[in-house]
Amino acid sequence: MKIRAEEEEAVASEAPREGKRLTPDSVQKVADLRFVSSVKGQKSKVSSSPRSSVTGPHCRTLSGNQVWRSPAVTCMQVGDPAHLRAMLRPLRLLLSGLQTQPSRCCSSFVSRMRYVNRLKEDDEACAAALKDGSIFLFHRLSPLLRCTDVGTFSPAALTCSDVQSVLQRLGSDGSPLKEAVLIGCSEQNQAQFCLDVGELDQAAVEEASQGSFIDLRKAFFLLPAAEAPLVSKGQALLRWHQSTRFCGASGQPAQRNRAGSQRFCSSSSTVYYPKMSAVAVALVSDGKRCLLGRQPSFPRGLYSALAGFCDMGETLEEALCREVAEEVGLEIQSISYSSSQHWPFPHSSFMLGCHALVSPAHTQLCVDRSELEDARWFTVDEITRALQVKAPPRRGDPPILWLPPKHALANRLIREWVEQQRKSEGGA
Ligand SMILES: NC(=O)C1=CN([C@@H]2O[C@H](COP(=O)(O)OP(=O)(O)OC[C@H]3O[C@@H](n4cnc5c(N)ncnc54)[C@H](O)[C@@H]3O)[C@@H](O)[C@H]2O)C=CC1
């Protein structure tokens, strides 16, 4: 693509350089300028009409915060037979945009994702973004939470200067800030980082930052569903850095990039990226009942969907069929994918959730007691009652069924199954 001199200048003026901060907006402006240039380039190849000129990209909001951008609008002289067509073009584009994927999308979501991607690649831009960003503190992998006015909990988002003053107050020179790891970008276009201050006294940091470090197992379930993934991602990245300081090939220290999205060993030229283990989780049904199992380590009364780590080289379907065969001795007939989740316990897993069907003629369980303490079929009424239970059963309480918490993918699969059963009962 050929960009003319003044456009190159315009692109350069928006492109990040020394002393100029990279923001989601500047990333978008550069993309816009390049886009206009590319349309001009394409136009001159297709048509050389002197009456046509490109004025710039055209935005319109279709829904929510999604802003779909149509190709650049071409201006025509009034009186030109093409004038009417040109005037109707925005309407045609809007209508076609409702039916098909537009050719280009520059929603604020896209800008944020591109911005985060740039920060991962550009150490200087990332260091600058940290100064304006928000930082989530952890102490030995426990996130800092604050209690809100309405009694709920929220991860404490500190500014860089807040963290600097906390560090200074505790006699630190501020160098721990270099260990901050990029986790994303907020909807307010602020880069988000996490930082473990485990070297400092926990109570002193809590006092200085007006929050409490809470173990992730507890924190995860105290937080609203929208905020729990943020702390779980932060913890997963910090844990990965703490356990991947050295190269497995050379034994030499592996250096991290500024964003903390990778580590590199210059001795063996190996790049390391954060890792997750793939786990298949399935809610097995025979069409009328669903199958749940429990491990001896589960809290009293808790039953969950069957799950297992994917073996190297296995597909999701193969892993599910193997796990169900191993754990309860059943053969799966069909699988439908539901959704996925990052699960931080005990270490990062990438959970892939499915619904699985077995033949109603072959539902006899043969439980492998080395894997599961128990597995049972439950009716939709039993599950519906269990979904109403608000607190786990205490010692001495009569035995009741207790289901995984709402943040867990297994809970989602169970709710989806109940909904599906109710629908088919209604349809029957
Ligand atoms: N979010 C959710 O809704 C659910 C999450 N889970 C999670 O899924 C994971 C797997 O579940 P289970 O198999 O029941 O757990 P598990 O912890 O009982 O693991 C079973 C066996 O897999 C092996 N293993 C452990 N880590 C591994 C790894 N990284 N890669 C390969 N093999 C490994 C070990 O031999 C272990 O004994 C657990 O981390 C569990 O917390 C399980 C069910 C629901």
Image (cartoon, rainbow, N blue to C red):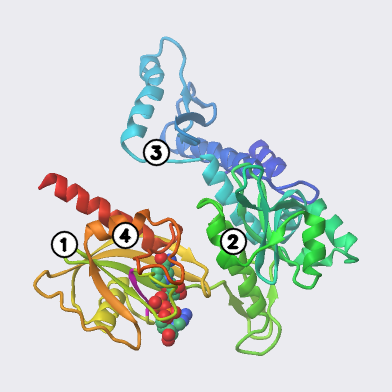
Residue that numbered label 2 is attached to: 219
**Depicted 45 relative to depicted 81: above or below:** below
Q: CA distance from mark 4 to mark 2?
A: 23 Å
- Can you tell which quarter of the image residue 235 is in? bottom right
Give the quarter the ligand 1 occupies. Answer: bottom left
Which tag, 4 or 2, sits closer to the chain's start? 2
Q: CA distance from mark 1 to mark 2?
A: 36 Å
Which tag, 4 or 1, sits closer to the chain's start? 1
Q: CA distance from mark 3 to mark 1?
A: 40 Å
Check disc 4 and report its element: helix, strand or loop: helix
**Depicted 330 relative to depicted 344: above or below:** below
* Residue 188 on image: x %, y %: 63, 41
Residue that numbered label 1 is attached to: 287
Identified by mark 3, the residue type is Pro
Residue that numbered label 4 is attached to: 414
Report the residue at 16% width, 62% height from top: 287
Per the rendering, the mark at residue 376 is none
Report the residue at 74% width, 47% height from top: 21
Residue 154: in magenta span: no
Give the camera-side residue of 310 and 387: 387
**Does the residue at mark 3 contact the one at mark 1 (Cβ under 8 Å)?**
no
**Depicted 381 relative to depicted 176: above or below:** above
Report the residue at 75% width, 50% height from top: 17
Which tag, 1 or 2, sits closer to the chain's start? 2
